[in-house]
Amino acid sequence: MRAQAIRLGRGAENDITFTNDTVSTYHAALHWQRDGGFMITDLNSSNSTLVNNQEIKQRTLSSGDVIELGEVRMRLVLNQEAKGEMST
């Protein structure tokens, strides 16, 4: 089964969890788009979601974008062969 979105945060119910206390319980969600791309949405987090050092509420992502959830920083790297293959 293919998930349409994955939730990121500190809570155990998230699809991807972090132990850093600057990450909100339900911090953000990554959404798979029909065109094979991804969008991120901030879930009213305490410390905001940043993409490339800009605070966002929702934004389409590109390969190489740096996503920050509180003190947690990660880089999105899309492999052309894997594009759109977000499964859980």
Image (tube, grey):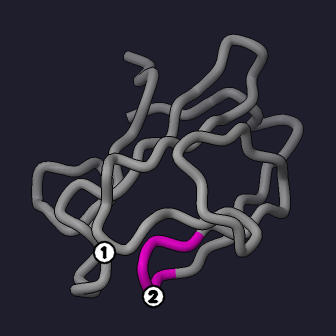
* Location of the C terminus (image quadrant): top left
Query: Which is more toward the observer, 85 or 44?
Result: 44
Residue 23 is tagged as 1
Q: Residue at x 74, y 23 (%)?
A: 36
- Residue segment shown in magenta: 68-72
In this view, 79 is above or below 25: above
Q: Residue at x 52, y 31 (%)?
A: 31
Q: Residue at x 37, y 16 (%)?
A: 1
Residue 32 drawn at (x, y percent): 58, 27
For this view, does 39 lie left or right of residue 12? right
Structural crowding at the residue carrying mark 2, measured as other residues with C-alpha within 10 Å and reported as few (<14), some (14–19) or many (≥20): few
Name which quarter of the figure residue 75 lies in: bottom right
Query: Which is more toward the observer, 32 or 60?
Result: 60
Q: Are marks 2 and 1 in contact (CB under 8 Å)?
A: yes
Residue 15 drawn at (x, y percent): 29, 48
| Residue denoted by label 2 | 71
Instruction: Classify mark 1: helix, strand or loop.
Output: loop
